[in-house]
Image: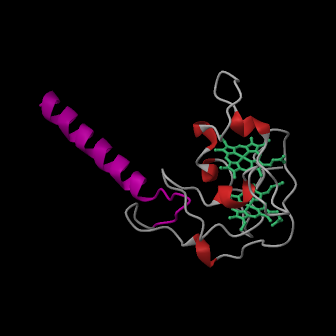
Amino acid sequence: MRKILIVVLMLIATSVTWAASDAVFSLRGDSSLNADSVDVTDRKWRDGEGTVVRSYPQQPPLVPHSTEDYVITRDSNDCLICHDWQSELPGATKIGVSHFENRDGQALSSISPRRYFCNQCHVPQRDVEPLVLNVN
Ligand code: HEC
Ligand code: HEC
């Protein structure tokens, strides 16, 4: 009898947990994890407004222009067309010396593999609402 009671109590406890987990909403709202998230390309680029001021000294600067058409693959990197030191394009900030160092601090003659995939660190600036507001 006691065993049956324990099993029944465990079943009730499990169903309560299930019911509670149904009510949890993530920042994605109630959309399924498999569904695509909102397409951010619909949102406004902050193009031509200058770069948003960096918040801390080592912050990778935000990208003040659209990056939609610039492709980075193993063999080619469109960002380097303008930002590499060899580029003749005036106005595009040349990538800093830190981007030519390997992890031991040795200078390389071309971009370090650690800094090759620019959009790992540099994100385009967009007019979007913060997902989570600051508490204070
Ligand atoms: C056609 C040339 C061109 C290409 C290609 C290009 N950029 Fe730029 N980029 C510029 C110019 C010009 C500026 C500075 C002027 C501006 O738009 O404010 C700039 C500014 C930036 C800045 C801000 C630098 C600073 O001083 O704060 C970053 C970061 C940047 N680009 C990253 C990228 C990345 C990452 C890519 C590839 C996805 C890329 N750019 C591709 C021309 C280019
Ligand atoms: C691992 C992160 C990382 C990657 C990858 C990366 N950067 Fe940066 N980038 C930074 C940081 C951090 C800074 C600011 C400090 C510095 O200059 O190192 C910066 C600075 C810059 C600047 C401003 C330089 C200046 O003198 O103000 C430009 C332009 C830039 N990066 C372009 C690029 C491009 C183009 C690529 C791809 C070829 C790239 N970065 C890849 C982290 C990164």
Is 60 rendered above or below residue 31?
Answer: above
Query: Viewed as shown, does residue 109 lie left or right of 136?
Result: left
Closer to us: 88 or 20: 88
Task: Where is residue 75? Give x, y as percent.
Answer: 49, 52
Closer to us: 91 or 9: 91
Closer to us: 30 or 40: 40
Asked whether residue 28 is in view, the answer is yes
Ligand 1: quadrant of the figure: bottom right
| Residue 67: quadrant of the picture | bottom right
Is 30 rendered above or below residue 80?
Answer: below
Q: Main secondary structure of the magenta part?
A: helix
* Outermost residue to the top: 104
The segment highlighted magenta reads 1-30
Q: Residue at horizontal 29%, vertical 49%?
A: 15
Q: Residue at horizontal 72%, vertical 51%?
A: 84
| Residue 71: quadrant of the picture | bottom right
Q: Residue at horizontal 84%, vertical 59%?
A: 52
Is 79 rendered above or below residue 98?
Answer: below
Closer to us: 61 or 109: 109
Task: Where is residue 78? Give x, y as percent.
Answer: 61, 61
Is 124 rendered above or below residue 44?
Answer: above
Query: Viewed as shown, does residue 55 lie left or right of 85?
Result: right
Task: Where is residue 57? Give x, y as percent.
Answer: 85, 39
Picture quarter with the N terminus: top left
Q: Residue at horizontal 66%, vertical 47%?
A: 121
